[in-house]
Image (cartoon, grey):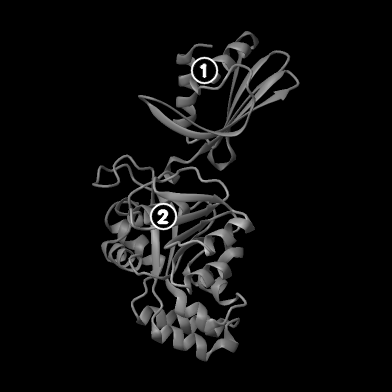
């Protein structure tokens, strides 16, 4: 199989927004299976004679030694028509080798803070809050809705030579120069808290389990940024309030909650978003003394519907704008 053919197949996967590609053999030939959005699949049957050539050319393109197997190896591949980042596995199979390519959504790669799709007012609030010396900033979203991208954008804004930044992660797809990356282990958590760290970022599959640790770290004079899975800012706030820590400590530490989701972007040529496929929809919560006092006063009612209805109204009265406001504005702007 020539490199041209390989690039054509990968180009197809890119332009069809494939999430995964599986190349496997059978008695009759090769199968190139693209897993597309919404559960659809596109399958190409290739001649059996191409099997050896496919594996060899793929290894050559990705600079992998002949015969080398791979398990979740981070790779990049591009030509003039596409750019793909993915996790590659090459494993033994009944009919030779099976090649599994889990494509990383390019929207997850690093973007400047100004490119995320934030309204100017929200962007100004975020820039102000992340430049505070200490406190907790929470970035929340449903699964695969861009919270890691937002975290990286915030870190890029904060990344300076005089800042000692530690990043706790399960598997960091992108690394920024000047930041200390550590795997998510209890030993590394202890290590960070005993180091002279200015900023701590946490982005793991189970970040919610680390909220109490993040709050505690923020209370020691550090700026802590953590991602968590939540449908909106209120759910993220509830996750914080239900930790075993005193509510006053939680509220004194909390500086901001950013909640977001992604939506398809119209193909329009507008500054900062040209060529993008998706855009973020945001809501920002900045709890002030009124909010904190209300929560502390009604601590015993936190699990009631009435508590959250009153809190929501109080937030709106204080300038909080639900994500529905951002949707309406972006519709008016012709972005979505």
Provide the secondary structure element on which disc 2 rests.
Answer: helix
Which of the 4 quarters of the picture holds residue 72? top right
Is 150 placed above or below 320 here? above
Instruction: Locate residue 64, reporting x and y percent.
Output: 55, 22
Q: Which of 46 and 193 is in front in this view?
A: 193
Residue 205: give its label. none
Q: Residue at x 49, y 11 (%)?
A: 2
> Where does the N terminus fall, quadrant-wise?
top right
Q: Name the residue under label 2.
A: 150
Residue 65, quarter of the rendered image? top right
Query: How many numbered marks does the figure carry?
Result: 2
Local crowd size for mark 1, using a 10 Å CA cut-off: few (<14), some (14–19), many (≥20): few
Up the image or down, 192 lies above or below 36; here it is below
Residue 247 drawn above or below residue 122 = below
**Residue drawn at (41%, 78%), measured in percent from left and top?**
287
In this rendering, the answer to whether 301 lies above or below 145 is below
Residue 139 appears in the figure: no
Q: Which residue is drawn at 42% across and 43% down?
A: 109
Q: In this view, does 15 lie to the left or right of 130?
A: right
Image position, residue 320 (x, y; %): 37, 74
Measuring from the top left, give residue 176's x and y in whole percent.
41, 46
**Identity of the residue furthest to the bottom in this view:** 297
At label 2, counting other C-alpha atoms closer than 10 Å, the crowd grade (few under 14, some 14-19, many 20 or more) is many
Decide which of tag 2 and tag 1 comes sooner along the chain: 1
Label 2 to label 1, Cα distance in Å?
34 Å
Q: Residue at the far top: name it.
A: 49
Residue 332 as seen in the image, left or right of residue 222 = left
Q: Dot 1: what SS? A: helix
Viewer-proximal residue among 323 and 138? 138
Q: Which residue is depicted at the point 51% across and 46% down?
A: 172
Camera sees residue 179: yes
Residue at mark 1: 60
């Amino acid at each position: 199989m020539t490199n041209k053919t390989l690039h054509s197949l990968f180009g197809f996967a890119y332009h069809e927004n494939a999430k995964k590609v599986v190349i496997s053999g059978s008695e009759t030939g090769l199968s190139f299976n693209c897993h597309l959005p919404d559960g659809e699949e596109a399958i190409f049957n290739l001649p059996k004679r191409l099997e050896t050539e496919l594996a060899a050319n793929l290894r050559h393109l990705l600079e992998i030694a002949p015969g080398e197997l791979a398990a979740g190896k981070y790779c990049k591949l591009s030509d003039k028509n596409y750019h793909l980042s993915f996790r590659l596995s090459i494993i033994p199979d009944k009919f030779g080798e099976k090649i599994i390519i889990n494509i990383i959504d390019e929207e997850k790669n690093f973007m400047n803070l100004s490119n995320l799709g934030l309204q100017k007012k929200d962007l100004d609030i975020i820039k102000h809050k992340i430049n505070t010396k200490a406190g907790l900033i929470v970035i929340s979203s449903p699964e695969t809705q861009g919270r890691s991208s937002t975290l990286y954008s915030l870190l890029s804004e904060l990344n300076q030579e005089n800042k000692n930044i530690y990043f706790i992660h399960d598997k960091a797809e992108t690394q920024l120069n000047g930041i200390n990356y550590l795997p998510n282990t209890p030993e590394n958590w202890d290590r960070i808290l005993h180091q002279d760290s200015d900023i701590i970022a946490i982005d793991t599959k189970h970040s919610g389990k680390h909220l109490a640790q993040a709050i505690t770290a923020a209370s020691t004079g550090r700026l802590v940024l953590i991602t968590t899975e939540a449908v909106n800012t209120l759910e993220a706030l509830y996750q914080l309030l239900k930790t075993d820590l005193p509510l006053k400590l939680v509220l004194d530490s909390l500086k901001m909650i950013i909640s977001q989701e992604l939506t398809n972007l119209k193909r329009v040529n507008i500054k900062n978003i040209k060529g993008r496929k998706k855009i973020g929809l945001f809501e920002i919560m900045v709890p002030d003394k009124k909010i904190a006092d209300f929560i502390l006063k009604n601590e015993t009612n936190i699990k009631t519907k009435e508590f959250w209805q009153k809190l929501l109204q109080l937030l709106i009265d204080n300038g909080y704008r639900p994500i529905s406001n951002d949707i309406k504005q972006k519709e008016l702007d012709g972005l979505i």
